[in-house]
Image (tube, rainbow, N blue to C red):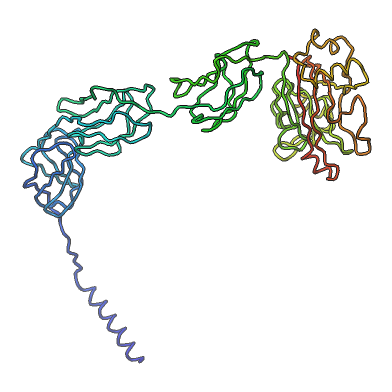
Amino acid sequence: MKNKIQSIIAALVLIVFTSCDETLTIDTVVQGAPEISAFEPATGKAGTEITITGSCMRDVQSATIGDTEAPIKYKISQEKIVVVVPVGAKSGKITLKTKSEKAESSDAFTVIFPTPTLQKVPVSGKVDEEIEIQGTNLDVVTKVFFKETEAVVSYRSEKELVVKVPFVADDQVDLTLQYLSEQGTKTIATTGKAFEIIKDRPTISNAMPAKVTEGETITLNGENLNLIESVLFGTTPAIITRKEAGIIAFRVPTLPQTATVAVTAPYYEGTATLTLSAACEVFIPKVFFYPNLMLGAHRNDFGNMINATTGVVNTACILKDKAAQPSIDFAAVFNSNYDFALNGPQNTAGGLRNYWCDGKTFITGNTVDALTAEGYGDFLSVKTVFLVLLESDAAQAELIDKVKSGALTDISPAATPSLFNGTIVPNSNTTRSRRTSENENLTNATVYKAGSVVVFYNEKKNKTGILLIRQINVNYSQTKAYNDQNASIVFDLYYQR
């Protein structure tokens, strides 16, 4: 076995040394210059396939007819290639090019420009629906327009065009087909009855209320309501809060004064309008009113600080916006003795660092000076004071009744004189719910419960507000940490304009 292996190795060495004495040669195939001997057909329109015969066709990289590049469809063999007459080509000789060589036909190819004709055009179609147009020479059509809007052509042949109906503001339009002639672009148009574009239309199934109040959310049901682009009370736009095919919801906007206006909903780029109400009375109270607001504790992720002017509840992240700091009227916090407190900004200095923004604290100071140095001085400069109204006081009881009966439509010296003549005076930096050790029926000018009416006054804004406490959501069986994130109150807010 060993002798056999040695014999094989010796033979390989002999081959190697023998090879070094020989000249290495590689056969190469040299491609000749292409030649065109014939082509057919001699004439044709755009899209026509031309079969070219000759020699050395394999290396052809491009083809032109006249000065226009023609796509190569097939390289059949060294002797045959097929190119396609491109759109826009003009009569001229055919040229084939390789990387370094070219060949030109002795005769010119004649490009013909047939005129398309229309034989059958649908009379109507729905937006985005495909329709079929029939005629002759339709394969030379380059574009189709519905009035001035270009449609998508998904299929074309000599006798058929399939196009998608586009959205056009008009319901009745003429169709125009664009094609190339020897002189340039030309068009043909449909004649007779115009094409009808069928469009979905929004409809409502429940009536708009005859009387609405500023800030009220209106919900309507129907069909194709997603097409609505805006809702107008007269000329004043409402804020759309929800829009789907079967439902639309919007907030009644603020008008200059109480008025009866038409409520309309433009759609299709404002070219069509659905009338929601021909005459709707919009009541503009002389007080801002925001029902069923929820304010969370200081580590709640939906909000614990409120701008009473707008009724917007924010998380403490709002304090990062220096310009927004003076807009906050009060802040909520859950205390260690298990009460849910509302504090004027001036009363938050010691606990402001306990508030969360995006799940974590971002303030470090706990004194007015330290917080001012951090950039929160404009917030702390707001002084808001509170008073929980008591039934035992006649003037307060009268205001309580007005709030609970829904009769409070104005906060002003004329409408609520007790709030402006010194009869009812908020004077506490804070108000709170009861503590765990206190009786549920505790009555106190600084302690609120469900059903309490709380008056507050923002000295910086010089505005008075009223809260009707609806719910107090404190879980006394859970830890403080749980309530820091989950405790909340629900209330109606009235605020002086």
Residue 11 lies, in percent from the top left, at: 27, 83
- Is 284 rendered above or below residue 114? above
Q: Residue at x 25, y 36 (%)?
A: 161
Instruction: Using the image as rendered, state which of residue 443 and residue 274 is in the foreground.
Output: 274
Q: Which quadrant holds the C terminus? A: top right
- Is 427 rendered above or below residue 199? above
Instruction: Using the image as rendered, state which of residue 126 and residue 251 is in the foreground.
Output: 126
- Is 457 rendered above or below residue 134? above
Instruction: Please tell me how many numbered marks the rendered image carries.
Output: 0
Residue 449 lies, in percent from the top left, at: 86, 30
**Residue 383 sits in quarter:** top right
**Residue 294 sits in quarter:** top right
Residue 153 lies, in percent from the top left, at: 29, 35
- Is 41 rendered above or below residue 114? below
Residue 441 lies, in percent from the top left, at: 92, 32
Q: Which quadrant holds the N terminus? A: bottom left
Q: Residue at x 93, y 36 (%)?
A: 438
278 to the left or right of 408: left
Q: In the displayed image of the protein, which residue is found farthest to the top?
A: 414
398 to the left or right of 361: right
Q: Residue at x 77, y 40 (%)?
A: 486
- From this viewpoint, is residue 49 visible? yes
- From this viewpoint, is residue 381 visible? no
